[in-house]
Amino acid sequence: MKPSMPSFLDIEAGRKRLASMRVVASEPIHSLYTLLKLTMDDGSPLPPMVPGQFVQVAVPDAPHTFLRRPISVNMVDEADNTLWLLIRRAGEGTNRLCDLNVGSVLSVILPLGNGFSSPIDPSERLLLVGGGVGVAPLLYMGKLLAEHGFIPEFLLGARSEVDLLQRDLFAAYGEVHVATDDGSTGEHGLVTQHSRLSQPVDKIYCCGPAPMMKAVAKEARRIGADCEVSLENMMACGVGACLCCVENTVKGNVCVCTEGPVFNINQLTWPI
Amino acid sequence: MANLNVKVGSLELKNPVLTASGTFGYGEEFADFIDLSRLGGYIIKGTTLAAREGNPYPRMAETPAGMLNAVGLQNKGVDYFIENIYPRIKDYDSKLIVNVSGAKPEDYAEVCRRLAPLDKVSAVEINISCPNVKQGGMAFGTTCAGAAEVTRAVRSAYPKTVIVKLSPNVTDITEIARAVEAEGADAVSLINTLMGMAIDVERRRPCLSTVTGGLSGPAVRPVAVRMVWQTAKAVRIPVVGLGGIMCGRDAVEFLLAGATAIEIGTANFIDPSVTVKIVDEINDYCDRHGFSNVSDLIGALEC
Ligand SMILES: Cc1cc2nc3c(=O)[nH]c(=O)nc-3n(C[C@H](O)[C@H](O)[C@H](O)COP(=O)(O)OP(=O)(O)OC[C@H]3O[C@@H](n4cnc5c(N)ncnc54)[C@H](O)[C@@H]3O)c2cc1C
Ligand SMILES: Cc1cc2nc3c(=O)[nH]c(=O)nc-3n(C[C@H](O)[C@H](O)[C@H](O)COP(=O)(O)O)c2cc1C
Ligand code: FES
């Protein structure tokens, strides 16, 4: 009984593989973030991936970075066969990744994890809520939803206008609502204080810092919306072998790298 | 192409490469990356009599050239293994070895008794060296009397190959090795993780929920090689060597120090296909140095 491949709408994720991938674009967003675009070094097509899945990247030339780094699938661009990774500088590993030059070759394990569940009814009011670099998996999600006749709306939170990532790209797939901590753009305050949440929502897909996701989960409970969150537990193997990444759930401790990173909040034991 | 066969007691392996328990899941997690039939054998997750939830998150911290873990033997218990997991994994053409843990000698023996009828389980590896559980585990592995007691209980319950996995967290590992040899162990494997600790200085808190954990990865390799070398000289039974092996060169280091077989642990997290690469690299080493049998490398250190 091998677990079945995660699927989303008409896409079924490919088998896991260890691939050499070449950096074809490295676009600094500002001093803190870089968008990397990778393609298969041997020219083969990317394996199918579903939104919410992630990859494990080995960081080259980083003497203090022993383990791979988990990074979400930000976008799969079939037209030019590229996988996008949106990376925030958090330490040595992500710094090295943000500084990579075009032409660098990376060892990547992909695709990993379960991904978001697909909605069924196009009339569902879907809100994709992202905070900081947590917006990353929502872009690919928004693209597929829009392409399949769903109407995603985005609620993006950031510290300040400069930290608001990929706003224009999101706008291509649906209406974008914004909240910033300093009020430099959009509504002033946290995403959970945004006026969009006082209008009806059927389903929330959320990714961001843990305190934000907990606040969003609480809000979802309050307004009676279904809610999925994407967790960022620390990982070693990424393939379900080491049991280092566990989250406590109603089924006990489960691996975030295989049974997640996306969980319905009803599966979690968060005090919300 | 060298002959890579080795024998650990009566257990015949097609090559000396095994996987270290707790780092290779049940093998199936790696089936997308490698052909498991190329391995000498695969040692699966620590299995206990009753199900265990393990320790709370966070259970892992990256450290220089390695990592600390405090998983705490999370598993669904031996009966669940036999009913649900064994049928899925038994047909890989490679020797299946189950790693066994317990809080009492009778628990170890009972788990082994239940595993004994399974045709495709070729051996058990008895973990008397887990630093991450409160009861049992390493407590048995740090005294000769404790190690001997567990070995005796298992020996009377399990007729096939018994490998006892030793803790490096002792003053003299050779004494423990001799104690388990005297009780009928067919082989010893070493090392399990070294007890360690890391602190998040910004938050002034331990990195692990359990404060201390087990160190693995290349950081521990020189300690492991030294202990394998000492132990191989001290006992007549075969020694299985592990601790920080990342490539074929590292594996050969253990063979030269006296190991009959080796296990690959943390390296699986960095490269999920590393095990089969190491099989090839050991073969290349033999060819390059004119050894037609890998067994000629065992203990071939010149000093
Ligand atoms: C499933 C998943 C998807 C992710 N997706 C993205 C993404 O798309 N873009 C992105 O920029 N980051 C993402 N992350 C977080 C990213 O993996 C970490 O920021 C990275 O591992 C930090 O490594 P480092 O060497 O730069 O920093 P380190 O020096 O290792 O750590 C720096 C700081 O980051 C914290 N940190 C370390 N590991 C993690 C982690 N796994 N999650 C959160 N904080 C961590 C540490 O506690 C420390 O405070 C994701 C994490 C997971 C588990
Ligand atoms: C995440 C993790 C889980 C482990 N679980 C077990 C276990 O269940 N039983 C056991 O005997 N050893 C366990 N170990 C120890 C390894 O099998 C091995 O002895 C140790 O990691 C040293 O080898 P390495 O440096 O090659 O990883 C575990 C190690 C790690 C890193
Ligand atoms: S990171 Fe190893 S099991 Fe999830």
Image (tube, coloured by chain):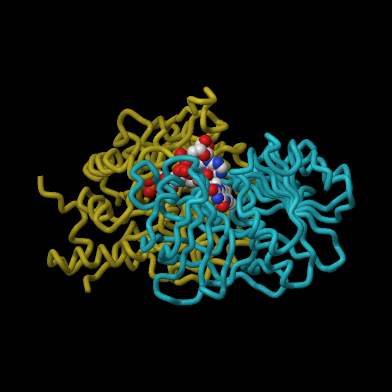
Chain colours: A cyan, B yellow
Q: Residue furthest left?
A: B303
Q: Is residue A152 left or right of residue A105?
A: right
The residue at the point 78 percent across, 40 percent down is: A192
Q: Is residue A139 left or right of residue A42?
A: right
Q: Is residue B77 visible?
A: no
Question: In the rendered image of this protein, does residue B180 appear above or below residue A149?
Answer: above
Which of these two is toward me, B6 or B109?
B6
The answer to which quarter of the image holds residue A215 is top right
The residue at the point 40 percent across, 50 percent down is: A99
Q: Residue furthest top?
A: B204
The residue at the point 72 percent across, 72 percent down is: A147
Which of these two is toward me, B127 or B132?
B132
Which of these two is toward me, B24 or B6?
B24
Q: Position of residue B15 (x, y in %)?
A: 32, 65
Q: How many marks?
A: 0
Q: Quadrant of the N terminus of chain A?
A: bottom right
Which of these two is toward me, B163 or B76?
B76
Q: Position of residue B197 (x, y in %)?
A: 45, 29
The residue at the point 54 percent across, 25 percent down is: B203
